[in-house]
């Protein structure tokens, strides 16, 4: 309990620290701070933690799991909060409807079939779903994401879908300690987006960088950084169910 209170009072402070880190990285990169959006990754944290972040001015939130993510979207929608919710977790075909009906953005599209379902299931009354394609850049541990070779075909297929707006690319590189090593996969993702831009795709989004490597990502052109632990603290997966909707 005491632990939870400490986390809560620190969220505004931690958010501020993250925004300072982003501003410093933007200055180092010679980029305006307005070019980089902060996505607060609230997976495993309850609505009370999200509310603290909202009070501190945060509007974009990232979630990985269903139904946890969709429940938080509904909770804040019922309270009239206008927020932007981003799905950043692996997408299962049987849960695309929940994503299409709840979220504003999906960062992890890596299969045509999933993209088609999202487009079909997007309610007509909602604006197009903003989409990033997840790319498995070199050195990436996870099994998700298309290879750079598969990317052009996926981009072409997603562009044709009526209720999706293709915005850019996303990656989750393997953790690296040194700045130079952190920058390499981010530079690769930027190069892949530039290739697609040259081929005529109107892309403007690079979703890359997390708590430990957001500076490297901003130096390589990130327009969205996805930050969890640096804002909300360490995640405790076992406590997730109990804390989820008990503010
Ligand atoms: C959990 C997660 C994050 C946030 O990671 P932190 O290290 O807590 O900042 C970012 N992106 C994705 C895809 C994630 O799953």
Image (cartoon, rainbow, N blue to C red):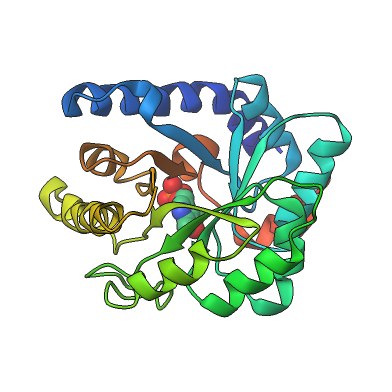
- Can you tell which quarter of the image residue 226 is in? top left
Q: Residue furthest left?
A: 180
Q: Residue at x 34, y 77 (%)?
A: 150
Q: Residue at x 59, y 27 (%)?
A: 58
Q: Residue at x 33, y 54 (%)?
A: 200
Q: Quadrant of the N terminus?
A: top right
Whether residue 177 is visible, yes or no, is no
Q: Residue furthest right?
A: 78
> 151 left or right of 245?
left
Q: How many marks?
A: 0
222 or 20: which is nearer to us? 222
Q: Is residue 70 above or below residue 98?
A: above
Instruction: Please provide percent x and percent y for residue 224.
Output: 42, 41
124 or 95: which is nearer to us? 124
Whether residue 201 is visible, yes or no, is yes
Q: Is residue 12 above or below residue 234?
A: above
> 234 left or right of 4?
left
Q: Quadrant of the C terminus?
A: top right
Instruction: Please provide percent x and percent y for residue 97.
Output: 76, 67
Instruction: Please provide percent x and percent y for residue 164.
Output: 60, 57
Instruction: Please provide percent x and percent y for residue 102.
Output: 75, 52
> 69 left or right of 229?
right
Q: Is residue 61 above or below residue 5?
A: below
> 99 left or right of 31?
right
Q: Is residue 122 above or below residue 58?
A: below
């Amino acid at each position: 309990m005491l632990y939870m209170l400490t986390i809560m009072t620190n969220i505004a402070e931690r958010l501020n620290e993250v925004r300072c880190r982003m501003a410093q990285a933007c200055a180092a990169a010679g980029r305006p701070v307005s070019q980089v959006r902060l996505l607060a990754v609230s997976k495993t944290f309850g609505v009370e933690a999200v509310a603290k972040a909202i009070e501190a001015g945060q509007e974009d939130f990232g979630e990985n799991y269903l139904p946890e993510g969709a429940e938080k979207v509904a909770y804040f929608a019922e309270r009239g909060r206008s927020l932007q919710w981003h799905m950043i977790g692996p997408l299962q075909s049987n849960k695309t409807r929940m994503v299409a009906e709840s979220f504003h953005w999906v960062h992890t599209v890596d299969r045509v079939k999933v993209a088609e379902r999202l487009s079909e299931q997007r309610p007509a009354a909602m604006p197009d779903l903003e989409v990033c394609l997840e790319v498995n850049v070199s050195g990436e541990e996870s099994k998700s994401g298309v290879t750079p070779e598969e990317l052009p075909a996926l981009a072409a297929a997603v562009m044709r879908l009526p209720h999706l707006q293709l915005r850019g690319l996303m990656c989750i590189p393997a953790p690296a300690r040194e700045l130079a090593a952190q920058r390499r996969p981010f530079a690769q993702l930027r190069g892949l987006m530039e290739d697609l831009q040259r081929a005529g795709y109107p892309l403007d989004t690079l979703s890359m960088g997390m708590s430990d490597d957001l500076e490297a990502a901003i130096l390589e052109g990130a327009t969205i950084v996805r930050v969890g632990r640096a804002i909300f603290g360490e995640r405790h997966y076992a406590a997730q169910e109990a804390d989820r909707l008990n503010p």
